[in-house]
Amino acid sequence: MRLQDHPGSSLYALVGCALLGLLLLALPAAAQEAARAPEYRAFPLIGSRLAVWAIAQLHLNFAAFILGVPIFAVIIEIMGWRTGEQRYDWLSHEFVKLTFAAFSTTALLGALLLFLFVGYYPRFWAYMSGIFYPTFSVYAMLFFLETFTVYLWYYGWDWLSGSKKWIHVCLGVLSNLFGTAILFVSNAWVTFMTSPGGIDEAGSLTSLWGAINNYTWMPINIHRLIANVTFGGTIAAAYAAVRFLQAKTDEERARYDWMGYVGNFVAISALMVLPFAGYYLGREIYAFNQTMGITMMGGFMSWLWVVQAILIGILFLGSNYYLWLGMERIPGSERYRRYIPYMIMILAAGFIVWATPRSIPLTPSEARIMGGTHHPVLGVLGVMSAKNTAVNLMILTTFLSYLLYRRANKESVKPWVGTGMAAQWLIFAAAATVVTFYGVYGYFVESIVRIGYSVYQVLAVLGAIALVMAIDIPMFRGARSTGQIRWGTIAPRSQYVLILLAVTFTWLMGLMGFARSGIRQHWHVYGVARDTSVDAWTPALGYAANMITIVTAVFFALVLFIFWLGGLGEKGKAEGHGHVAPAIAGGSDP
Amino acid sequence: MRVPVLVKVAVFALVVMGAYTYYANSIPQLRSEPPEELSLEGGNVTPEQLVKAGEGIFKGKGTCEVCHRIGQKGTRAPDLGGIGASAAKRKAGTSAKAYLIESLLDPGAHLVEGYPNIMPKVDRPPIGLNRSELWALTAFMESLGGTVDVKLDDIPKTAGSAAGGGQVAELKLPGDPKAGQAVFMGKGGCIACHKAGSVGASPVGPDLSQIAKIQTPEYIMAKILNPAGMGTVAGYPGGVMPATLGQTLTAKEYLDLVAFLLTLKGEGAAPAAKK
Ligand code: HEM
């Protein structure tokens, strides 16, 4: 144990935990008092809603980070353990170090959020406690278990090495299990607010399990789990990018180039499955309540999906651009450059399909198809067919980019390479055809059927990815190399792309948080507990965007501060716990 | 002096977020307001007032138009044109009034053939209409081809939501009428053909001075984007009004313009018009 490594952060953690303990103890008393308390109190200056909004989003950002990163950190650790390659172990340690630094802030923000609920929304909080009280102690217990395991995982790195490495890996896996459990518990509360279950018409509890396992609980669990991995990947990559830009030596540059690459690889892999989880979530919302589904996709929220589409478009474009820039540091990649213009064309076309909301040609019959009677301009945007088609084609293209990147310095020595490649192209073409077919057909059916089509589209894409990889892996096994990857020689602007991705994804998370809360409109708990406060109105997008930007900026400032506090920003010092950072060379697989 | 990396990165991040924020502020700003409640209990209302209130609920708080249309098939639900008459024939032994009330309070009890059971109970949240509102709504539906004979007492005492409140909130289109007038006279070119209150005098298209009084916002919005699709105003030539406004106006200009047209209620327009 080398606690003195990070004196600042452990003091910080102590304060955080103490505060937390106090708050948890005060909880039952506070809940009882709430029955007598006024329905709302006003938070000074900015008002209660903005206070809760900001703290909840910050808490969620940090929580997502510390839950997402360990998922791939442990996978990378296992890779290092099984292959014996030191650089993976180093990288995994580096990732856990980031998690650890952000831990106490997450807890502090959680405590602050709780304080705001109890203090400023007493009636609402009393209702929520009445439903979920038994889960609170589970949450607290899981939180302590999680803290403890991650602590051991991080500080036990040297101690549990060599023949004891398996114990260490188990700790990593365990902390992920606890982390996921925490996520599932808190998701029960949030999803209950959107789609309450397990209660009777008066709103009293009939089944705690019914309240937990409400319509949107599982979809949100899955959606968030995946999104957290993406988020963790982008933040870790942005961290590496900053270190790359600050690096003084080639060796350091090589190391952080590689770290950034892995972070981005993780982010993109998870990002490609996110839309699928999103459709599942959307479908459950429709299943819970048609009107809510229609409000979400065709009502006052429609424009939000346009903004979301643009952000996702930027994520896809950015990550492809990053891969192409990365190819320049791989000898042999010249062979594939000619594909890039075509890929740009597909991506740009996809992007344009999404980003045409500024002036909308629209006929009333289109509006009628949509069912959005409130506002004809909004109506047509609910026609998701075009957008789904675009995103699926973009996923396919991104996958193609990755495929080319993967084989950039390889030449297959298998005799069946011609057939193999032809089969791969055929699979790509088939998937693109399926996607386009359902995209066009989607215009002629009801939205509920259309949502089903997007499942076929995504299945075609995921199926194609699986099949192509199944051919690709054996095809390039034992391939001839055309040269090693020259890590560290990537163009510095690529690092700004990584930062762009991190900022965009964080902003997107903020936006989706707004969507999740906004579809409840003037309800705290949809259809059960009405919002009668002065903030019962649901703000327009511009207002929300201003808020999201402020919170995102604060988030990055905090992250910077915490990494600095944790001694992670020290220049030139790449090792922790006597971990000498390995030299990075060769190998295009992460 | 070299700019430190962190400063460059921070500026870059702020520019990116600034761009997103700018974009999100440049598209239509829709705020969702909590709905207001209607209370008719105890008051003296004429059937006409009742029907009118019911129509308002049908189009607004009741959110019926999300699914239904009157006079044509809705997107998800049957045409309610003539329902006041046809309701009597739906279920043997059930009067039109009783059937209508039942289809509001318990829509699943009798399904119209070919339609799934997706209609919400309208006295429950989230639509959550109260007894007065149910009364008015029933009167409105009876007025569609039948006789309005519903009394408040016909609505079961248990009906009406405990939680109160309605679901779909009023939409506010906060376009700026002033800016919209400028679009009307400038970029939109409307003034070449239309008169609107104190501005314009061209007789090519109809006088729009009272358009907000005689037409729905929906119609006005759709008309600008697709003049031909909305039918031609009697007495005027078709195909004259440009069909490209949806492409040339930005979303903001469009909203401002609509906001301006919605102020045209015929009042205050007279002085200039008399000239
Ligand atoms: C390991 C540390 C923690 C993790 C990983 C974590 C994770 C999460 C996540 C993912 C959510 C869902 C948030 C949302 O959708 O808005 C959440 C919600 C919440 N958390 Fe935590 N949390 C942690 C610690 C805490 C602590 C220490 C507290 C306070 C005692 C706390 C209080 C809350 C509350 C009150 C919510 C509900 C927010 C809402 O309803 O939107 N959390 N947490």
Image (cartoon, helix red, strand yellow):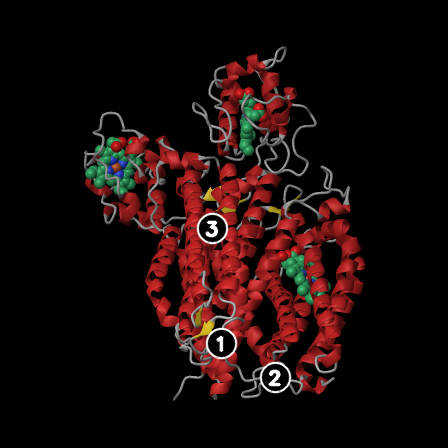
* Chain under disc 3: A
Residue holding disc 1: A241
In this rendering, the label closer to the viewer, 2 or 1: 1
Residue A469, given in percent of the width and then of the height, sits at: 51, 59
Front position in the image: B223 or A534: B223
Classify mark 1: helix, strand or loop.
helix
Residue B210 in sight: yes
Q: Residue shown at 48%/35% (left/top)? A: A446
Q: Amino acid at mark 2?
A: Gly
Classify mark 3: helix, strand or loop.
helix
Q: Do the residues bearing badges 2 and 3 touch, measured as CB atoms within 8 Å?
A: no
Where residue A305 is drawn, which disc sits there?
3
Front position in the image: A581 or B134: A581
Task: Point out the image quarter for the N terminus of chain B.
Answer: bottom left
Whether the residue under disc 2 has CB within 8 Å of ligand 1: no
Left or right: B165 as drawn, with respect to A243: right
Where residue A377 is drawn, which disc sits there?
none
Among the two numbered marks 2 and 3 on one chain, the one whose residue lies closer to the N terminus = 3
